[in-house]
Amino acid sequence: MSTLAKSRRDGQALRVIVEGIGLHHGKEVRLELVRAAGPVQFEREGVVRSIDAFQVSGTRFATSIACDAFELHTVEHFLAALAGLGVRGGCCLRVSGGAELPLLDGGAREYASWVAKLGLPTERSSLRIVRPVRIEVGGSIYELEPGEETSMSVEVELPTSCDRKASWNGARGTFIDEIAPARTFAIESEVAELTKLGLARHVEPRSVLVVSEAAIFGEAPIARHEPARHKLLDLIGDAYLHHGPPRGVMRVLRPGHTHNHTAFARALGMGALTMECM
């Protein structure tokens, strides 16, 4: 994996290049993040599409998105970096080689670092919770309440070796320091299934944790709250595809990619979430 930032005189990068291997598909991929006017865009093989042209196309173990021209996989960590830094436009992600974004450090810290190097403008989310609602999706519960600022929290069913709650106050600094570093993880009992499916074959040990009832395994340092914070990280990334994270209070019990997207779609459909002109 390599990172290259080509800088201007003011110290801000014109572009950032990252090379890595996709977590599940195992293919080499090259990402180039460049400044571009307008909303966030994605480019593949010379075809450019705005983020609004994409729909969620897959949610098993990660979030995939597709437009009329191409599909991208495992996008949630990159999108969480944009969300956590408050970036709503001004850039294009060029993807070549594999179509799955690389795992990098297992969370969103490296993505956030090179997004920050571009010095992109930031703005508040235009998605707002306008009335209280409780949405149940399978075994997951999403509680939304109006508020001026973003507040998101999760409670996750995890082994006793882990803390089960995590929260984010919507602040950029809190995201960078506390949420972005949280690495992806697998429950010990799930490892055999992942192996059988041929997934997660190209994981760097530093980038992933394995959780059992007795302990959390991985490269140190490891904190009890890291798995729950990673679930919150995924929720933040998934929310970005629905123009979030929203302003207001959002509490989620047992979040997961499939249920996250269903809950946002329902909340938008029933008018509990609305887009405001900023």
Image (cartoon, rainbow, N blue to C red):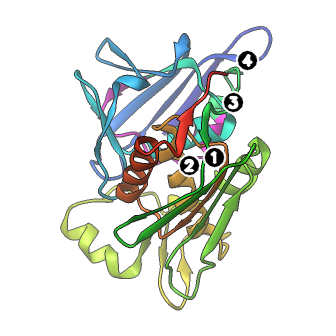
Say if 150 sits above or below 3 in the image.
below
Local secondary structure at mark 2: helix
Say if 3 sits above or below 34 in the image.
below
User: Disc 3 to disc 1, how far (Cα)?
Assistant: 10 Å
Query: How many C-alpha atoms fall within 10 Å of the one at disc 3: few (<14), some, or many (≥20)?
Result: some
Q: Nearer the viewer, mark 2 or mark 4?
A: 2
Local secondary structure at mark 1: helix
Q: Is residue 43 left or right of residue 216?
A: left
**Residue 276 image offset from top left, x and y in percent:** 61, 28
Q: Is residue 119 left or right of residue 92?
A: right
| Magenta span | 94-113
Local secondary structure at mark 4: loop
Q: Which amino acid does label 2 sit on?
A: Ile
Local secondary structure at mark 3: helix
Give the mark nearer the N terminus: 2 vs 1.
1
* Residue at image point 71% right, 25% down: 122
Circles 3 and 4: CB atoms closer than 8 Å: no
Asked whether 248 or 230 is in front, the reply is 248
Circles 1 and 4: CB atoms closer than 8 Å: no
User: Disc 1 to disc 4, how far (Cα)?
Assistant: 18 Å
Residue under numbered circle 4: 12
Q: What residue type is labelled 4?
A: Gln
Residue 37, visible in the rendered structure: yes
Residue under numbered circle 3: 116
Query: How many C-alpha atoms fall within 10 Å of the one at disc 4: few (<14), some, or many (≥20)?
Result: some
Give the mark nearer the N terminus: 3 vs 1.
1
Residue under numbered circle 2: 236
**Residue 96 image offset from top left, x and y in percent:** 34, 25
User: Disc 2 to disc 4, how far (Cα)?
Assistant: 26 Å
* Residue at image point 56% right, 69% down: 227
* View extreme (bottom): residue: 214
